[in-house]
């Protein structure tokens, strides 16, 4: 959805203001109010001039176009579908709430959005003391337009997050680099992982703060960095393996431009939290026989050493889908890459996910000595070739790693039954089930 530059700038300034309030809270400064409702509703209640004088007039014209309203309704359906999906995995599973959300999804239209907005407006007028002082422009119709504008705002924020997720500006221009440079530390010289891969090394002098939000703490400054793209249960597993001495070197992707200057450990508390745990043989979802198919493009003869893994290049897929995962195994490495039939598309490229690991065998057990996860960027032409050619490289942008482990000795299956590689693939891939049974068979081969 293309927005006027002035409106996009307004949205960005609102997001930045709320971000700064959140960062101050993490630094133990609760002096600023963060708002009671979503940002756009708060602007309505605060009688924000830009909202009423610029944003709402633009929206009044835009909703006259059928294509624009179609996009609004599509975005609202996507939001409700996401909420339904989260409700289904919610440990406090509430069937009545799910049925209500399904009806809401089925009824999405211009009239239903308007009806819900007007009901909310009446609720505000009956419960908010401030409502008695509403200005003339804080009326029902403008409240409905505000609710539509919230959908536009959230779509804009989602686009911005996706853009920032994969973009890395020159390191010397980032707040992170400049902060350390001012402290007479050149990260490009002191942290090899940062200079090569934009990753921040987790050393003996740093600490992982795992929760909401996940952070790296450098207590010498003190400084906290937000960890990007690595979920909490994976970080807890990494921390456990570090404490057990199975991981020597760990580096994570952290925000270059969100710095929290404090040594306080402040977390966001929610009413409930969905706890994800590492995969084990007991909780690993298994696919019915014949669901996942494998095509072997190349395969070595049986190895002389019965403890070795047979070298191969294969694809894994379902008969009812054109999504696939490439798998390449050599004498000391394994590479897995998802190739979606409909990939994630950026303006100039298609994005895939890859996990690469190096392994060794000791006492008949498989161990990981190195593992990393990265996003690969293909031009559209390269991606079309990649679907059938394992050797095709992605050259649209520089690869972006999210974590990297070196000098490790991590069993594929830990002594307590935790499946290390399975857990990482499940966390990083969109279709992890394509590899789950194959990896388990690797562990159980004679």
Image: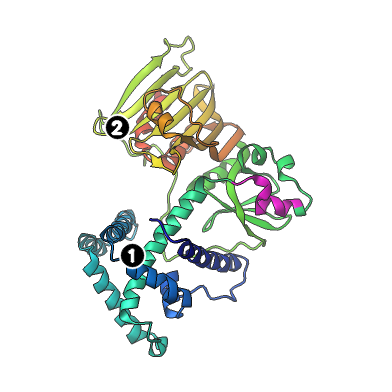
Residue 195 pos. (x, y %): 67, 39
Instruction: Report the magenta residues as a range.
Output: 169-181
Reading the image, the residue beneath label 1 is: 62
Query: Dot 2 surroundings within 10 Å: few (below 14), some, or many (20 or more)?
Result: few
Apparent side of residue 441 relative to residue 35 in the rendered image (left or right): left
Q: Quadrant of the C terminus?
A: top left
Compute the Cα span from label 1 to label 2: 38 Å
Reading the image, the residue beneath label 2 is: 322
Membership of 248 in magenta stretch: no
Q: Residue at (57%, 45%) from the top-left corner? A: 168
**Mark 1 element type:** helix
Q: Quadrant of the N terminus?
A: bottom left
Membership of 172 in magenta stretch: yes
Please state which of residues 128 and 316 is positioned toward the viewer in this rendering: 128
Please state which of residues 58 and 45 is positioned toward the viewer in this rendering: 58
**Quarter location, residue 289:** top left
Residue 190 pos. (x, y %): 73, 41
Q: Is residue 352 above or below residue 76?
A: above
First in sequence: mark 1 vs mark 2: 1
Query: Dot 1 surroundings within 10 Å: few (below 14), some, or many (20 or more)?
Result: few
Apparent side of residue 2 relative to residue 34 in the rendered image (left or right): left
Residue 432 pos. (x, y %): 38, 37
Q: Residue at (33%, 21%) from the top-left corner? A: 295
Residue 12 pos. (x, y %): 51, 63
């Amino acid at each position: 959805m293309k927005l006027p530059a002035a409106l996009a700038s307004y949205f960005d300034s609102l997001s930045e203001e709320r971000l700064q309030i959140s960062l101050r809270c993490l630094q133990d400064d609760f002096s600023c109010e963060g708002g009671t409702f979503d940002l756009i509703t708060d602007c309505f209640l605060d009688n924000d001039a830009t909202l009423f004088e610029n944003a709402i007039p633009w929206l009044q014209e835009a909703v006259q176009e059928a294509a624009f309203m179609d996009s609004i309704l599509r975005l609202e359906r996507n939001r409700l579908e996401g909420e339904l999906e989260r409700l289904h995995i919610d440990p406090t599973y509430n069937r009545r709430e799910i049925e209500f959300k399904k009806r809401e999804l089925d009824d999405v239209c211009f009239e239903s959005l308007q009806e819900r907005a007007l009901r909310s407006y009446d609720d505000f007028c009956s419960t908010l003391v401030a409502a008695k002082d509403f200005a003339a422009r804080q009326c029902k119709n403008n409240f409905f337009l505000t609710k539509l504008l919230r959908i536009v705002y959230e779509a804009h924020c989602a686009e911005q997050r996706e853009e920032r997720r994969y973009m890395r500006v020159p390191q010397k221009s980032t707040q992170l680099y400049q902060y350390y440079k001012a402290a007479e530390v050149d990260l490009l010289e002191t942290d090899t992982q940062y200079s090569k891969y934009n990753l921040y090394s987790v050393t003996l002098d740093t600490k992982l703060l795992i929760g909401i939000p996940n952070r790296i703490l450098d207590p010498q400054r003190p400084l906290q960095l937000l960890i990007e793209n690595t979920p909490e249960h994976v970080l807890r597993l990494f921390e456990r393996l570090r404490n057990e001495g199975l991981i020597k070197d760990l580096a994570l992707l952290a925000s270059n431009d969100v710095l929290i200057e404090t040594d306080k450990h402040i977390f966001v508390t929610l009413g409930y939290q969905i706890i994800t745990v590492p995969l084990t043989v007991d909780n690993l979802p298994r696919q019915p026989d014949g669901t996942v198919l494998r095509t072997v493009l190349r395969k070595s003869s049986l190895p002389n050493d019965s403890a070795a893994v047979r070298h191969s290049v294969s694809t894994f897929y379902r008969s009812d889908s054109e999504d696939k995962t490439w798998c390449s195994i050599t004498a000391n490495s394994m590479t897995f890459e998802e190739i979606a039939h409909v990939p994630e598309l950026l303006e100039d490229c298609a994005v895939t996910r890859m996990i690469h690991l190096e392994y060794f065998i000791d006492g008949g057990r498989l161990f990981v000595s190195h593992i990393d996860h990265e996003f690969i960027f293909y031009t559209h032409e390269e991606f079309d070739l990649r679907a059938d050619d394992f050797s095709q490289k992605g050259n649209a942008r520089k690869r972006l790693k999210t974590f990297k482990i070196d000098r490790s000795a991590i069993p594929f299956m830990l002594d307590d039954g935790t499946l290390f590689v399975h857990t990482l693939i499940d966390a990083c891939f969109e279709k992890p089930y394509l590899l789950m049974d194959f990896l388990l068979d690797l562990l159980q081969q004679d």
